[in-house]
Image (spheres, rainbow, N blue to C red):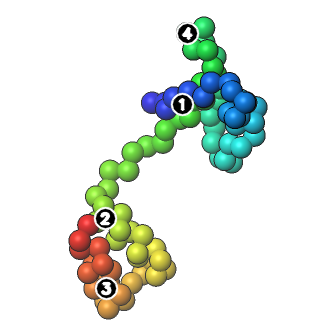
Amino acid sequence: MVLLTALAGATNSSPSAAQVLNKTPPGLQGRYITSPEFPNPIYVVPIGPRDTRTPRQRCLDAEIAKVGGSASPLAQATIDLKCSQR
């Protein structure tokens, strides 16, 4: 699965493709593609696997990681209370 993002038309205020490419965050493995159907280049970025955890489980995982991975019974009860509304 890929995500397609079309660049804005070339005007004085819009950046060129080279300027946008230079501002790409590190770690992205995207690339520009061109096609006769599209007047501007298209930047294609691969999408990673989907997170299938529930919001509550994501909250629990994040809070347990904050305390170092092993929570005391009191910390676990606090985390459970904090994440119960998600």
Q: Which mark is residue 5?
A: 1
Residue depicted at 49% across the width and 32% down the height: 3
N-term-proximal mark, 4 vs 3: 4
**Residue 40 vertical position relative to residue 65 in the rendered view, above or below:** above
Q: Which residue is mark 3?
A: 78
Q: Position of residue 73 (x, y in %)?
A: 31, 89
Amino acid marked by disc 1: Thr
Amino acid marked by disc 4: Glu
N-term-proximal mark, 4 vs 2: 4
Q: CA distance from mark 3 to mark 1?
A: 42 Å
Residue depicted at 48% across the width and 42% down the height: 48
Q: Which mark is residue 25?
A: none
The secondary element bearing badge 2 is classed as: helix
Amino acid marked by disc 2: Gln
The secondary element bearing badge 1 is classed as: strand
Residue 13 appears in the picture as rendered: yes
In the image, is 12 to the left or to the right of 80?
right
Amino acid marked by disc 3: Thr
Q: Which mark is residue 57?
A: 2
